[in-house]
Amino acid sequence: MFTKVTSGEVQTITIQFEGETLVVRKGLNVAAALLEAGVKQFRETPVSGQARTPFCMMGVCFDCLLIIDGMHNQQSCMIEVAEGMKIERQLGMATIEFNASAEQGL
Amino acid sequence: MTDTFDLIIIGAGPAGMAAAELAAKHGASILILDEQARPGGQIYRAVEIMANRNRVELGDSYHAGLTLVNAFRDSHVQYIPKASVWQVSQGGEVGYSFDGTAHIVIGKQVIIATGAQERPFPIPGWTLSGVMTMGAAQILLKESELAIEDAVFAGCGPLFYLVIHQYLTAGIPIKAVIDLTPKGNYLKALPHLFSALPALPKIYEGWKWKREIIKSNVPYFSDVSDLKILGEEGVTGISYKQGSTWKTLDASHILLHQGVVPNVNISLAAGCKSSWNEDQACWRINVDDWFQSSVKGVRVTGDGASIGGALAAEQRGRIAAVGALVQLEKITATEGDHLAAPYKAALAAEMRVRPFLDALFKPSDTFRIPQHDNTIVCRCEEVTVGQVRQVVGMGCAGPNQLKSFSRCGMGPCQGRFCGLTVSELISETLKKPVSAVGYYRLRPPVKPLLLQELANLKITKGDSL
Amino acid sequence: MITNAITSASRTADAIIIGGGLHGCSTALQLAMRGMSVIIIEKDYVGRHASGVNAGGVRRLGRDLAEVPLSVESAKMWHDIESLVGDDCGFVASRQIKVAETEEHMVQLQNRVQQVKALGFDHEKMIDQKELREKLPAISDHCVGGLIVEGDGSANPFRTSQAFRRQCESLGVQLKENTVVSRFEKKEGVWHIHTSMGKFESPNLVNCAGAWGGKMAEMLGESVPIDTRAPMLMITSRIPPFIDSVVGVQGRPLSFKQFVNGTVLIGGGHVGKANPDTNETLLKYEGLAINANIAMTLFPQIRHAKIVRSWAGIEGYLPDNIPVISKSNIDGAFHSFGYSAHGFQMSPIAGKILSELIIDGKSELSIDAFSINRFSNDSLKP
């Protein structure tokens, strides 16, 4: 279980994870914030579909990859939470929208 | 923004900060790029923020890092945090991304100070949700003030005892400690004790931490010859083998650690030559006394070259900076010798304890060279020990051919958590020395780069090169 | 430095091939299949360079007209590659499409179809915008049509090199890796090949040295204006399947392909620097950026894919961008090199042609266009 040990003053912000609203501590990285919130699965590997959670917390292992504000393959341990941030699990390969008009991409 | 700098430093840990601060004093124009949001590296992570909080468990040696961070903040350098360096090439080209845009800048001299990462710990179940490195737990404690309750700690090394000590001090419940220090290491370390004597207070401190763990009411196990992490969806327990008996502990968090190794991806991709070091069981970058690598104008220093610890890294950063200043003709070679003398003396003193620590905490072969066929070697592409052995049996002679045969090492982490295992596993399978087996040939970008970032690359070269 | 490990028996052969790339192995295989004893001398290891790290395109589409008949024959061999080398080489048949971005491109491609037809081939066909969008739903709206070939494909280059190697070895071909040639001598009809591992002897010497082929030719007194460059490739992390064709573009040197595992390979285009003496390649980011831009122009949504790796191989380019496949002017010497970054598909047929030149004295298919003499001053005279 992840528990807070801070004695400092805590400010919170609101983020969305998988459509659910989470109140998290300001200043945390996304990975830490989700771990504290009790999230047990961040991504599923593209090879076998195994559930993964952050392993190294320092940008080395790439197991904390999430979709953050629509962007895939984000190393969540390296990104600070922001008010209103929309976060989703990354299941398998990163997806790219190919059904939208091609021109939107430019 | 200036596009050409006298000196570009990669990494704002102890080595990078010390190098930047010293070089700036001697009039060099400096760009320092760091992946984290704040200076300090992993060792002094978030030290500025924690300064005003009552975090005694983190210890004096952590809080002492604030002095270096403050000196760095006061120096005249261009510091870009949250910058991800994806390439250093010959000729001083440094490619980095910041805020979704990729840039290439030129350093007349480059110092790579990318620090250490944790050694891979390939055992059955090490990819399960709920398993973390112990370094990760410490980073969570330092920066996010987050504790992991009721975790099983398994591993060895100075940091292993330190983090458990920090947990005990903070009163965070620990499920059990599995001490994997090989028994034979005590004897192997003994001959190095004499030269380590000046560091006796430190060794004593480490010994005290170990006593503290054993005397605490946390279950403590040693003489463990094998480990398996259990679980399907996530961790449910850990089995350990003592003698010929397997025993099991229920647990939902496992923290693993068996020492740190140089973070070499940028250096190797830059073409720096490296050598296998048997004492530390890792690849080290070949550098001279001034931390000059085999690539002209590129220095590799601190733990990124070879493991020496934070205090050594600080001195090594300064010595590398002096080397760069001489090359830049900011100071003469004689001035350089004079300037570096105290740093070199301090470094030598700091390094005297190293052979003792290396011998005492060298992880056992069992946990470096996985034996169970189903153990995952490459976390990204989920390549197992059995698959590596099979491919080697088909005539694959080294790590690079292994990549082509099996995709091992070709996922997003680019071999960071399998490279060492692969070198040693192939060495063992082919009965060839690790030095002859070699390491992955690393290819830029060393950090994944968005295609649109590459497409919009801003190449801003100065006139001087 | 002569090692004792090599017995004198293995120092002579009916043919000695310089270069353990795909062309060297393919030639060795064809010779061995016809009963010749063969030694391959390779300075690094099999498939270390262009053979093992190329984009793996098995393409008839858009070939130089001189290459078309060879390429068509080679394609047949690729479709049955398993019977040749005992492994499918990761070959996946697929269509290849060359995209036209403008009406002007369409005219150029139509002319091309006529030229190929005039040679007696009809594998290249035009498609209009509607068909293009059917075949490539992710293609940018501005593209107007293209040229298509059904039944081309791609293979895994490293696996292919290894399959050819294994098949060679099973037929008794001897591989001498980490062996560097220093000079050739011809005495009484026998080539004496001096290397870092001692001397080898054979009546037939075959230059399949790829980017180093020019150097070998020069040692035989047959200089060619070869240029060594480093074609750059980059690959993305896995993304869901979105293209099942190998895609090129008219007027732009780009190839674009998605593997079964989801990774996308972007190759062609701007080249990096190569140092054939040190095996080093230097990536040019300006060039990679342009290649990435072209990729985004064609498939706009690919912009959010992550590039996880880029690399370059060392390749030999000739001024007319077609290889040398030729007898030497010296008896008992043969050349097959300088494929100018499109030799992968040609390797099965080129090996067969070389074996015919060596054993029968002539090849079934015409190779006049690939003569080593085409660069000499004499051949330029009217």
Image: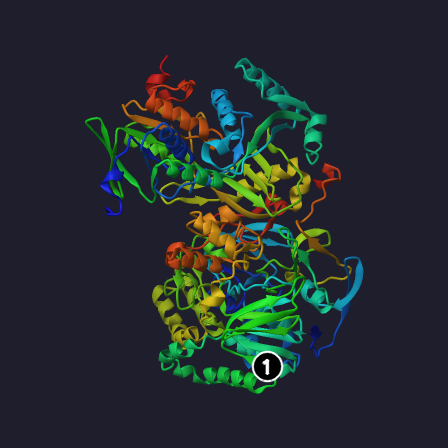
Q: Is residue B205 visible?
A: yes
- In the visual, does B158 lie left or right of A41? left
Please tell me whether residue C265 is drawn above or below residue B159 in the rendered image. above
Q: Residues within 10 Å of mark 1 (few under 14, many from 20)?
A: some
Residue plotted at (43% across, 76% down): B360
x, y (%) of residue C223?
Answer: 32, 28
User: Which quadrant of the figure has residue B177?
Assistant: bottom right
Q: Nearer the viewer, residue C219 or A44?
A: A44
Say which element carries label 1.
loop
- In the visual, does C137 lie left or right of B185? right
- In the visual, does C266 lie left or right of C8? right
Q: How is the image coloured?
A: rainbow
Q: Nearer the viewer, residue C44 or C362?
A: C362
Residue that lies at the very extreme toward the front in this rendered image: B244
Identified by mark 1, the residue type is Pro
- Chain at tag 1: B
Figure quadrant of the C terminus of chain C: top left
Reading the image, the residue beneath label 1 is B219
x, y (%) of residue B170?
Answer: 64, 82
- In the visual, does A8 lie left or right of B67? right
Please tell me whether residue B141 is drawn above or below residue B418 in the rendered image. below
x, y (%) of residue B203?
Answer: 46, 82
Q: Is residue B39 visible?
A: no
Tally the marks: 1
x, y (%) of residue C234?
Answer: 55, 43
